[in-house]
Image (tube, helix red, strand yellow):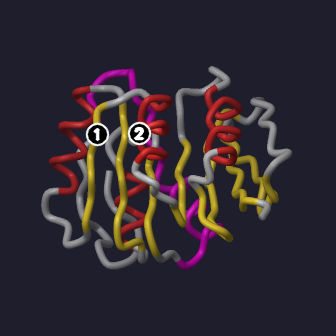
Amino acid sequence: MRVIGGKYKRFPLEALKGVTSRPTTDKIKETMFNIIGPLEGTGLDLFAGSGALGIEGLSRGLEHVIFVDGSFQAVQIIKKNTSKLDEQVEVYKNDYKRALKALVKRDIQFDMIFLDPPYDKGIIDDALPFIRENKLLKTNGRIMIECEKHEVIDTLDYEVLKHENYGITKLILLRGIS
């Protein structure tokens, strides 16, 4: 695995060992970031795994990213993968619900949120309303979702900027409705 574009292009990334993680392929990651376009500000990589999406975001313009994953092994890999970066990062081991509640208490808003949770668990439909209701997304902030192609995602409270299927994967780029 590696960073595919921007400031850290070709920077090697370690991946989690085993089958508990599903790293985003380079092809999907390239498509995802072509859809997203230019980045700036603060990002959240909520189901971070190896941290590849958040690191790619830093490489392409984000100044600060918070990485969250519930796995101790994932957090160790993220810390290793981000140790040589210039930008500010925060890495937390926490489940997504507790992490989102903690971010609300810190009064943080994000320009970009990456949601790539385990497929077919309904997690996205749980996280999106919470993000909206608690104003975790800045005005004109965006959310990039990677999910299984057949998952039905409730995007009612968001503007769908792009919706594409790639093999078994679906990418959805959302913007909050003010």
Q: Nearer the viewer, residue 66 or 23?
A: 66
Crowding around mark 2 (Cα neighbors within 10 Å: few <14, some 14 to 19, many 20+) is few
Residue 92: assigned label: 1
Q: Pick out the residue farthest to the right.
A: 156
Give the CA separation, mark 2 to mark 1.
Answer: 11 Å
Vertically, is 33 above or below 169? below
Coordinates of residue 143 in the picture (x, y in percent): 62, 55
- At a point 38% along the width and 21% down the height, the residue shown is 19
Vertically, is 144 above or below 5? above
**Side (left or right) of 22 relative to 161:** left
Q: Quadrant of the C terminus?
A: bottom right
**Side (left or right) of 107 relative to 142:** left
Name the residue that disc number 2 marks: 102
Residue 131: assigned label: none
Instruction: Reply yes or no: does residue 24 show up in magenta.
Output: yes
Assess whether mark 1 and mark 2 are in contact (beta carbons under 8 angstroms): yes
**Which SS class for mark 1?**
strand
Coordinates of residue 105 in the picture (x, y in percent): 43, 45
- At a point 27% along the width and 59% down the height, the residue shown is 89
Coordinates of residue 69 in the picture (x, y in percent): 36, 34
Quarter of the rendering containing residue 159: bottom right
**Which region of the structure is painted magenta?**
16-38
The amino acid type, in three-letter code, at marker 1 is Tyr
Q: Earlier in the sequence, mark 2 or mark 1?
A: 1
Quarter of the rendering containing residue 112: bottom right
